[in-house]
Amino acid sequence: MAKSTLRTCEKGHQYSKSSDCPTCPICEAARKPLTGFLAGLGAPARRALEAAGIDSLHAVSTWSEKELLQLHGFGPSSIPKLKQVLEAAGLNFKKEVT
């Protein structure tokens, strides 16, 4: 197991991390939305969508599952969660062109 190191974020929070990930868990918890489709996703998937400019369900619907899975931090466990909220809104993922 990797050794944990004590770090301090730019806002002054101290936290321990054993990975190279620079994200402060305290800051990340404060940013987590309480409502909306992003609230049901884990932080890495949420950050991946935000980094890609995906900020609405309509924006999600313009991406295929395969394209989303290529985003750094977006994993397969997020697909069913998004599929559920898309279907509730009458939307779907973009269809793959074969």
Image (spheres, rainbow, N blue to C red):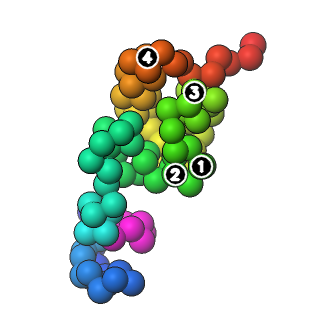
Left/right placement of residue 96 relative to residue 44 reads right
The dot on residue 13 is: none
Q: Which amino acid lies under the numbered mark 2 shown in the image of this protein?
A: Glu
Query: Quick one: quadrant of the N terminus?
Result: bottom left
The residue to which callout 2 is attached is 50
Dot 1: element: loop
Is 24 contained in the magenta span? Answer: yes
Q: Position of residue 47 (x, y in %)?
A: 46, 53
Q: Residues within 10 Å of mark 1 (few under 14, many from 20)?
A: few
Q: Marks 1 and 3: in contact by CB < 8 Å?
A: no
Determine the CA span between mark 3 and mark 1: 13 Å
Determine the CA span between mark 4 and mark 1: 21 Å
Q: Position of residue 46 (x, y in %)?
A: 43, 48
Residue at x 63% of width, y 29% of height: 62
Does the rendering let one see residue 84? yes
Residue at x 44% of width, y 20% of height: 89
Q: Quadrant of residue 70?
A: top right
**Which of the two discs, 4 and 3, labels the residue nearer the N terminus?**
3
Q: Residues within 10 Å of mark 3 (few under 14, many from 20)?
A: some
The residue to which callout 4 is attached is 87
The residue to which callout 3 is attached is 61
Residue extent of the magenta highlight: 19-25
Q: Which amino acid lies under the numbered mark 4 shown in the image of this protein?
A: Glu
